[in-house]
Amino acid sequence: MIATVTLNPALDRIYFIDDFQDNKTCHLINNNLVSLSSGGKGINVSVQLSKLDTTSVALGFIGQETGRLIEKELLLQGITTNFVRIDGRTRTSIFVVDSNNQTVKGICEHGPEISKEDRSMFLELFEKNMKSVDMVFIGGKLIDPLDSKFYAKLIRIANNNNVKTLVLPNEGCCAQVIKAEPFMLFPDIRENKTVNGVLLNSIPECIDFVKETYSNNTKTQYIVFDINKKVVICSRTTAYVFDIEQSNFANLIGLEDAIMSGFIYAIDKSYSEKELVNFVGALALEYLKTNKKYCSNLEDIMQRKNIIQPEVIAL
Amino acid sequence: MIVKDVYLRDVTSVSLNSNIKSVIKLFNLTRYYALPITNVDNEYIGCIDISDIIDSCVPKYMKDLSSSAFLPDVDMFYNRLNNVKDMLVKDLIKDDYPTLREEDSVSYAADLLEKFNRRTLPVLDGKKLLGILTRLEIISVLIKKESI
């Protein structure tokens, strides 16, 4: 069984407008031009896994009507939910996708605050769930007043229960997360290109960082980067590099969520390292090809998995 | 139709040491009428039903009356609720609460809900909690099926 954690979920409202102009009110001509869906890294991974016929339990905090809508959508898709209900309102994110101008504009709310009681309740719930799962994904935006130490605490609880942890921390959280030794780490370096103050601007720099991390860290088995239109998957012995072409639209829906889902799926199926890497690469490429929020064509992914050939670099 | 087709995969649960005040809050937030109880190993150990909490607040003599409509106010109930709210789930747990399995038929589930006068039943796989089934879910699914 797999668990996903979304501390700060969001209800994503996406408008598809062909020519979105300043100082002009846009009237949508039909309801198909707006989509409402559950968002947040963990939730995205849970939904992507369900598209690959893999069950998971979604954990996190939800509150008020937006929270209820998110939970309802997940339940309708057959995803098991186990949220802590809070008094605050789960945030809403709004995006405008303009295909003519190839732009995405968005507003993401900050999210509610978590009380001490809710925090304790979540830790109790998380610890309970770690007794019955094999793998947990933790990722996405933090929620006040929880900080990067909270991520680290969750990783340590999971590690103590022999649960594999796959972590997609947002910027600023990496130092604590690396110390907690997750099974797999995917640092977000898209904006600042730094992890723990180390500049990672090229694949050799990423590889040096990986070597340094592995030399101090006993549990982490995979570190992944999305850098300069390439996905780099580093195991303990080898770095695998895939070329990717990513558009602005793909940025909106999150290539990293697809990559994390690929890892979880492959580990769940006990794939060998080579199979795992190929599956993750195949899912990432199929995902970008579909240009939808989720990738559901498992047959195509499997076909691509068998022919894909990443560049291989020995560490 | 079987339970697997209709139940909610919501595994929200409470612990034996949760207090009744927090459980009432959770009833309010989830809008369920019963909540499963799990132990530290995440195993199902029983259920707490809102009717059992209400029952524990009603004085015994009132239960013997055919109607309570003539009582002047709800002070007695309120006083008892004040005591009950600090009690723990373990004081009110029903470990013989009826349960369902995924492969049970929906008609069996409906019968169980009716026979035990419950609105929510937990769905289990051994000791593992899989979700819950409510009367409303059954009716909603049947209505959807009819409209297809």
Image: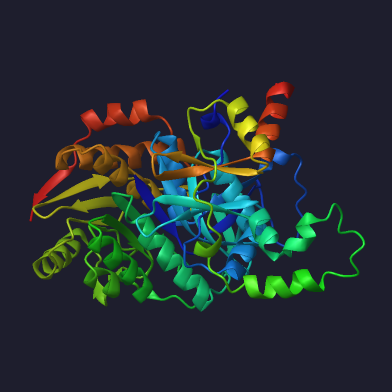
- Relative to residue A247, is residue A303 drawn left or right? left
Question: Observer-nearest residue: B135 or B17?
Answer: B17
| x, y percent for residue A59 | 45, 56
Residue occupying image coordinates x 77% and y 62%: B61
Residue A229 visible, this orientation: no
Q: Quadrant of residue A35?
A: top right
Q: Quadrant of the N terminus of chain A?
A: top left
Residue occupying image coordinates x 35% and y 47%: A2
- Relative to residue A238, is residue A159 drawn left or right? right
Question: Observer-nearest residue: B135 or A245?
Answer: B135
| x, y percent for residue A252 | 49, 52
Colour option used? rainbow
Count of residue discs: 0
Residue occupying image coordinates x 27% and y 41%: A268
Q: Quadrant of residue B65?
A: bottom right
| x, y percent for residue A40 | 49, 56
- Relative to residue A20, is residue A102 drawn left or right? left
Residue B84 visible, this orientation: yes
| x, y percent for residue A173 | 34, 72
Q: Quadrant of the C terminus of chain A?
A: bottom left
Residue occupying image coordinates x 61% and y 57%: A67
Question: Observer-nearest residue: A40 or B81?
Answer: B81
